[in-house]
Amino acid sequence: GQNIDQPTEMTATEGAIVQINCTYQTSGFNGLFWYQQHAGEAPTFLSYNVLDGLEEKGRFSSFLSRSKGYSYLLLKELQMKDSASYLCAVTKGSGNTPLVFGKGTRLSVIA
Amino acid sequence: DAGITQSPRYKITETGRQVTLMCHQTWSHSYMFWYRQDLGHGLRLIYYSAAADITDKGEVPDGYVVSRSKTENFPLTLESATRSQTSVYFCASSEIGTSGGPQYFGPGTRLTVT
C-alpha cells in the first residue's frame, strides 16, 4: 500500500519562515518531489530529494529522511506570491514507475 | 517555445457523450501522463506512456482510453462521459520517467459533465 500525508492548510505571515511536512508510507521508495500549484494553474516543479539531507534552492529548501519516511519543504522570507498549494510526491522505483501524490497543503501568506 | 499544451481548456459535455482531451508536447519527452485533480483527492494518475505505442494504467483508468501513435501527442478519451468524470485534467511529460526527473504539466482542461 501507499500513504502520503500532508497538512491540509497552513497560514503564515509575510517575511516569516514556514515548514510544510510530508510523511509517507510506500511499498518501495526512490525519491521525493515537491511541486507548487497556484490556484487555477498547473503544478510546477520545485525540488527532488533522493538522499537524506537538505537541498537548498534560493528561498526554498527541501529535506528528506528516508529512514523516517519524512520530508519537509522550508520556505523562507515568505512573500504574498508564495500563497499556493504545495504537493509532495513519491516515486517508488526506477524508469517509468509513476509518481504518487499527496493531497497537497494549501498555504496562505498574510500581511 | 510551446512546451506542453492541452486543448480544449474548458469543455462542457453531456452524460453519455464521447469526448477527447488533447495533449501535445514539443520537447520530445519519452514519458507522458494523464492526471485528474479533484477536491479532497489531489492528483490521481489515469494513464501513462513510456514511449510511442506503449501505455499503462494508473490508479483510476476506468472509463478512459488513451493512445500514443506519435511521441508528441497523448490524447485522452472518455468513451461515455459520466458526472463523476467532472474534473480538472492535467497532462504531463517527463524526459526520463519519474526516477530522476521532474514532470512538466500542461495548463489543464476543466471538464464539466452535465
Image: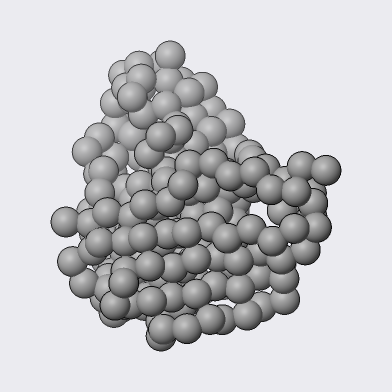
Residue B81 in view (yes/no): yes
Residue A106's place in the image compared with B113, above or below, is below
Q: Position of A27 compared to B44: left or right?
A: left
What residue appears at the point 61 percent right and 73 percent down from the top-left corner? Answer: A61
Residue A11, quarter of the rendered image = top right
Residue A45 in view (yes/no): no
Residue B97's place in the image compared with A87, above or below, is below
Q: Out of B14 and A4, give the one closest to the viewer.
A: A4
Q: Position of residue A14 (x, y in %)?
A: 79, 51
What residue appears at the point 40 percent right and 34 percent down from the top-left corner? Answer: B40
Q: Out of B51 and A66, give the one closest to the viewer.
A: A66
| Quarter of the image where the C terminus of chain B is located | top left
Q: Out of B4 and B42, give the one closest to the viewer.
A: B42
Residue A92, quarter of the rendered image = bottom left
What residue appears at the point 49 percent right and 66 percent down from the top-left corner? Answer: A72
What is the tally of numbered marks visible in this picture? 0
Q: Out of A99 and B23, give the one closest to the viewer.
A: A99
| Quarter of the image where the N terminus of chain B is located | bottom right
Q: Position of B96 compared to A55: left or right?
A: left
Q: Position of residue B57 (x, y in %)?
A: 23, 54
Colour mapping used in the image: one colour
Q: Position of B1 compared to A111: left or right?
A: left
What residue appears at the point 21 percent right and 72 percent down from the top-left corner? Answer: A28
Residue B63, quarter of the rendered image = top left
Q: Position of residue B99 (x, y in %)?
A: 36, 77
Q: Position of residue A85 (x, y in %)?
A: 58, 48
